[in-house]
């Protein structure tokens, strides 16, 4: 099974402050930058393991539903022949 995914960008917030005359005059600026997130091999492995666990959980739910439905059909009142 092939899986593809994309990683959201990182958001960086820079705040610059400049004051003169002992704080009498101040200038504040904020800048928001979105930079691409770099993903390491270890992070990719953790992410793929997470997706595998989700897939196994969904498969387990399917199997439980299938097993429970077949047991409901097979369980009947016992017939005793003498």
Image (spheres, rainbow, N blue to C red):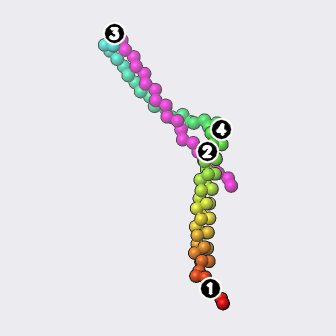
Q: Say which quarter of the image contains residue 69.
A: bottom right
CA–CA distance between discs 1 and 4?
Answer: 59 Å
Q: Quadrant of the N terminus?
A: bottom right
Residue identified by numbered label 4: 42
Q: At numbered mark 3, what does the secondary structure look like: helix, strand or loop?
A: helix
Q: Nearer the viewer, residue 43 or 4?
A: 43
| Nearest to viewer (mark 1 / mark 4) | 1
Q: Which residue is mark 3?
A: 21
Q: Which is more foreground, mark 1 or mark 3?
A: 1
Question: Which tag, 1 or 3, sits closer to the chain's start?
Answer: 3
Q: Rate crowding at label 2 as few (under 14), some (14 to 19) or many (20 or more) other CA atoms within 10 Å.
A: few
Q: Earlier in the sequence, mark 4 or mark 2?
A: 4
Q: Earlier in the sequence, mark 3 or mark 4?
A: 3
Residue on which the image places disc 2: 47
Nearer the observer: mark 3 or 2; the answer is 2
- The kind of secondary structure element at disc 2 is helix
Magenta-colored stretch includes residue 21: yes
Q: From mark 2 to mark 1, how far is it between C-alphas? A: 53 Å
Q: Vertically, is 24 above or below 50?
A: above
Q: Earlier in the sequence, mark 1 or mark 4?
A: 4
| Residue found 36% across the figure and 19% down from its top | 27
Q: Which residues are magenta?
A: 1-22
User: Which residue lies under the disc numbered 1?
Assistant: 79
User: Is the residue 57 above or below the residue 70 in the image?
Assistant: above
| Mark 1 vs mark 3, CA separation in Å | 100 Å
């Amino acid at each position: 099974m092939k899986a593809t995914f994309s990683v959201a960008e990182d958001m960086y917030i820079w705040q610059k402050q400049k004051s003169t005359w002992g704080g009498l005059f101040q200038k504040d600026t904020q800048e928001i930058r979105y930079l691409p997130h770099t993903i390491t091999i270890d992070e990719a492995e953790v992410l793929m393991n997470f997706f595998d666990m989700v897939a196994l959980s969904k498969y387990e739910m399917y199997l439980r539903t299938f097993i429970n439905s077949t047991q409901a059909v097979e369980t009947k009142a016992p017939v005793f022949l003498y």
